[in-house]
Image (cartoon, grey):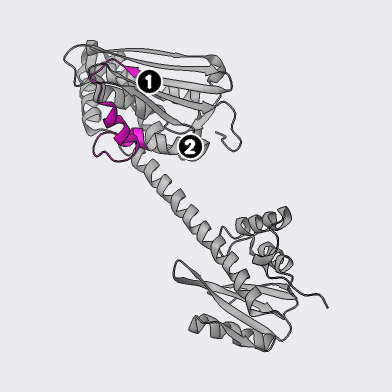
């Protein structure tokens, strides 16, 4: 007779680890997801049991193998879901699955020992907890992006529309062009729903925003925009550049009494695309910039922190924003992203 070895006591072979990873991925959408049946089959093979079933709170079991007596299975499952305690009837055993202290469903095994059931339940719970954490992180990131999209400065909107209105009679053609720029700016900032775009679209949004700001600030704002053709098609997270330009003007140039320059450049460096936003404005202490990126600062800097966090989420900890600044010496913000990144598509 073959003796079963508990899962956690087995050597962590590459095959076992790969199977555990696949099960985790299949359960990322929860016990009502489309890949639960595949996860059940993988669990039964991994723990070498005759039959295994997974149920959400509805009591609808997804089986792998032959469960045997359906009435016994139903009794055991009902008991577990109502009492939230393990239950056994003959060869049928079940345990509740608690995810973050909340009942999520039950795991049922036929013809096996209790230790194997607990180990299988541990793996399922870990997968479900990871899925919820990642879903929460994704929801938080989406909420941050929505907040960034909605962070259009009322001061800027009022000033832009006031300037446009003042030009309607004296320079109607320019007023019309600026109104179209304003429409494009609001459309890009508020109406887009995708996660990624391309560098060309980001630069187009920047040029539109700068045209409006130049109309508002007049000779106080000088701009220089330059982008290399080879990076125009590089896919980047949506709204990764415009918030940096807005930050340069609002917190670098506007506080100055004299004219200021904002430069926006994009170029290729090997396998990377490097985007820079630089101003010769008031600058800030380097510790202040570090606090902003770390999320320790309040008020100004939401855009910088949001862009930095999203870059790191997409490309890893080695990416993100680099901020070079000093009081009275302006600020330079550098974005470095891979020119080709799997899964990052506009």
Query: Is residue 12 located in the magenta-colored stretch of the structure?
Result: no
Label 2 element class:
loop
**Which circle marks residue 317 in the picture?**
2
Indicate the quadrant where residue 62 lies: bottom right
Residue appearing at x 49%, y 58% in the figure: 132
* Residue 73 in sight in this render: yes
Query: Is residue 295 located in the magenta-colored stretch of the structure?
Result: yes
Q: Residue furthest left?
A: 257
Residue appearing at x 67%, y 79% in the figure: 113
**Residue designated by label 1:** 277
Image height of 132 relative to 106, above or below: above
Indicate the quadrant where residue 11 lies: bottom right
Image height of 51 relative to 158, above or below: below
Q: Earlier in the sequence, mark 2 or mark 1?
A: 1
Label 1 element class:
strand
**Which circle marks residue 16 in the picture?**
none
Between 183 and 62, which is closer to the camera in this rendering? 62
- Return the x and y of residue 80 as percentages of the image width and height: 54, 82
- Horizontal side of 204 relative to 338 (left or right) equals left
Q: CA distance from mark 2 to mark 1?
A: 21 Å
Image height of 203 relative to 153, above or below: above
Label 1 Cα crowd, 10 Å radius (few <14 / some 14-19 / many 20+): many
Q: What are the residue bounds of the magenta stretch?
A: 278-305
* Residue 177 in sight in this render: no
- Return the x and y of residue 84 as percentages of the image width and height: 49, 80
């Amino acid at each position: 007779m073959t003796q079963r070895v508990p899962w956690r006591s087995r050597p962590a072979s590459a095959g076992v680890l790969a199977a555990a990873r696949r099960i985790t991925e299949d359960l990322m959408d929860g016990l009502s997801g489309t890949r639960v049946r595949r996860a059940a089959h993988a669990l039964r093979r991994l723990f070498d049991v005759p039959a295994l079933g997974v149920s959400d709170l509805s009591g609808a079991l997804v089986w792998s193998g032959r469960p045997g007596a359906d009435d016994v299975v139903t009794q055991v499952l009902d008991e577990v879901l109502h009492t939230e305690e393990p239950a056994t009837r003959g060869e049928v055993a079940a345990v509740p699955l608690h995810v973050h202290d909340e009942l999520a469903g039950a795991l049922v095994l036929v013809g096996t020992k209790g230790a194997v059931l607990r180990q299988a339940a541990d793996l399922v719970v870990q997968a479900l907890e990871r899925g919820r954490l990642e879903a929460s992180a994704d929801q938080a990131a989406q909420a941050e992006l929505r907040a960034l999209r909605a962070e259009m400065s009322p001061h800027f909107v009022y000033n832009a529309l006031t300037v446009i209105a003042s030009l309607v009679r004296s320079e109607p053609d320019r007023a019309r062009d600026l109104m179209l720029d304003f429409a494009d700016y609001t459309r890009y900032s508020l109406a887009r729903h995708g996660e990624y775009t391309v560098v060309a679209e980001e630069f187009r949004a920047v040029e539109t925003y700068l045209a409006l700001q130049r109309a508002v600030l007049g000779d106080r704002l000088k701009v220089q925009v330059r982008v290399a053709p080879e990076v125009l098609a590089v896919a980047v997270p949506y709204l990764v550049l415009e918030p940096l330009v807005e930050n340069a003007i609002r917190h670098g140039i506007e506080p100055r009494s004299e004219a200021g320059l904002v430069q926006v450049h994009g170029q290729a460096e090997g396998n990377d695309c490097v985007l820079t936003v630089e101003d010769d404005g008031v600058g800030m202490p380097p510790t202040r910039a570090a606090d902003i990126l770390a999320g320790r600062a309040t008020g100004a800097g939401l855009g910088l922190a949001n862009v930095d966090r999203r870059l790191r989420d997409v490309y890893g900890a080695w990416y993100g924003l680099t901020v070079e600044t000093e009081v009275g010496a302006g600020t330079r913000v550098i974005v470095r992203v891979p020119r080709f990144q799997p899964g990052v598509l506009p």
